[in-house]
Image: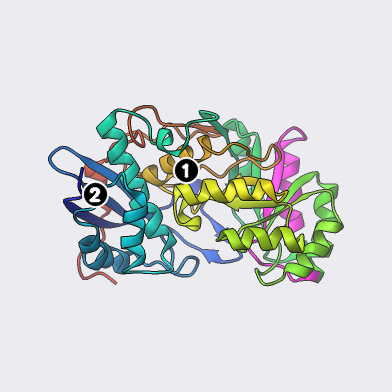
């Protein structure tokens, strides 16, 4: 097989009001993505997806589309999607610091190769250790009453773990978590995510209150350049302390272990720059004594399928912190025909060849960002 064509379609998809997000990084009502199609001759197309959030990952939808239609796409023409080392080198020869773009190209290469051979994408990643991934639902950092109602809704849907966004102000944060605990009951596991929102002093106060509420894990309590302060927090608690914004590369994993700033790391293909890189980083984390959970940027259907295959092929996942493989539950549309592999308490690996999902062209056209848009 050889790559014969590249199609990149930017889309903007509204969030559902049911769990409309708010974090320490801000609030959004719609999210942008680029849906990637890599063609390898008639009837051979692989799908990829890029999460585009300039404030968080620096990758903007219209510029990403331009790169894929232009210099990146041109560099990929003629490449064999099975030869990832060559494909990767071609990408790196054109752009840098675009991990989500890079991951999307790998998704599409694995998808087209899997479809060609009639095998699932995870077969190219070493095979599946599991086909079901335990997940947690995410509740926003909104007012206490609203989040309490959301928690009751989520518990009624069968969610067994809830992640509450915090980092807005300690008093309000603790009240929000207390409300979730009150309506969800003692059997629902709770984690929180501060998204770098606390100072060390605020975090120390918050940790005391969170422990009394039975919280099992705290994600990214401090800004990413606060390793020493994070290590102090970790020593002070029995809760898991997980790095997300601090963990992008293998070097970050090693540094987290060296400084003992976290005991758990949050990995996923977009942030880590690919499915294979994510699995290697997960193995490295385990080697240096860190637990691994899978996060997300609330991917749509293609990106969620890629996370499912990557999580399936990762040997060890944290028993304490379930994964965030939940993106399709939060949007009006997912860009795939069937995203029911993502559920309220767990996700499964989509059955079938490649990534196991098919593009919903009606949705792609409906949510496409028009040419000339800002």
Which residues are the magenta region?
172-200
Numbered mark located on residue 288 in the image: none
Horizontal relation, residue 108 to residue 330: left or right = left
Residue 262 rendering spot, x and y as whole percentages = 73, 57
Numbered mark located on residue 307 in the image: 1
- Magenta stretch: includes residue 185: yes
Per the image, label 1 sits on a secondary structure element best described as: helix
Q: Residue at x 83, y 55 (%)?
A: 209
Marks 1 and 2, the one that precedes in the sequence: 2
The count of marks equals 2
Nearer mark to the viewer, of 1 and 2: 2
Disc 1: CA contacts within 10 A as few (<14), some (14-19) or many (>=20): many
Disc 2: CA contacts within 10 A as few (<14), some (14-19) or many (>=20): many
Q: Which residue is mark 2?
A: 38
Which of the two residues, 252 or 188, is positioned nearer the viewer here?
Answer: 252
Residue 332 rendering spot, x and y as whole percentages = 38, 46
- State whether residue 77 is above or below residue 333: below
Which colour assignment does the render follow?
rainbow
Residue 371 visible at all: yes
Quadrant where the C terminus sits is bottom left
- State whether residue 346 is above or below residue 323: above
Horizontal relation, residue 67 to residue 295: left or right = left
Residue 33 visible at all: no
Q: Residue at x 48, y 70 (%)?
A: 55
User: Badges 1 and 2: C-beta atoms under 8 Å apart?
Assistant: no
């Amino acid at each position: 097989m050889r790559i014969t064509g590249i199609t990149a379609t930017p889309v903007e998809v509204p969030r559902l009001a049911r769990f409309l997000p708010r974090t320490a990084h801000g609030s959004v009502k719609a999210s942008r993505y680029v849906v990637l199609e890599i063609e390898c001759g008639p009837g051979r197309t692989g799908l990829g997806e890029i999460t585009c959030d300039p404030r968080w990952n620096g990758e903007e939808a219209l510029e990403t589309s331009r790169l894929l239609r232009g210099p990146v796409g041109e560099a990929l023409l003629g490449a064999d999607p099975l030869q990832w080392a060559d494909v990767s080198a071609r990408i790196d020869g054109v752009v840098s610091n675009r991990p989500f773009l890079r991951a999307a190209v790998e998704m599409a290469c694995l998808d087209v190769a899997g479809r060609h051979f009639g095998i699932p994408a995870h077969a190219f990643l070493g095979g599946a250790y599991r086909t079901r991934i335990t997940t947690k639902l995410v509740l926003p950092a909104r007012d206490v009453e609203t989040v309490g109602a959301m928690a009751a809704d989520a518990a009624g849907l069968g969610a067994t773990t809830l992640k509450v966004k915090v980092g807005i102000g300690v008093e309000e944060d603790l009240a929000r978590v207390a409300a979730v605990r009150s309506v969800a009951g003692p059997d629902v596991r709770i984690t929180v995510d501060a998204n770098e929102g606390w100072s060390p002093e605020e975090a120390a106060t918050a940790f005391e209150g969170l422990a009394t509420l039975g919280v099992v894990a705290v994600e990214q309590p401090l800004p990413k350049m606060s390793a020493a302060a994070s290590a102090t927090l970790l020593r002070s608690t029995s809760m898991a302390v997980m790095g997300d914004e601090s963990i992008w590369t293998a070097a970050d994993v090693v540094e987290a272990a060296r400084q003992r700033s976290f005991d758990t790391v949050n990995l996923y293909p977009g942030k880590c720059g690919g499915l294979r890189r994510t699995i290697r980083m997960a193995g490295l984390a385990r080697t240096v004594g860190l637990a691994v959970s899978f996060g997300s940027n609330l991917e749509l259907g293609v990106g969620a399928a890629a996370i499912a295959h990557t999580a399936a092929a990762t040997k060890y996942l944290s028993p304490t912190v379930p994964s965030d493989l939940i993106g399709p539950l939060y949007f009006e549309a997912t860009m795939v025909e069937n995203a029911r592999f993502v559920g309220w308490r767990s996700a499964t690996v989509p059955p079938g060849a490649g990534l196991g999902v098919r593009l919903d062209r009606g949705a792609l056209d409906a949510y496409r960002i028009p040419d000339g848009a800002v």
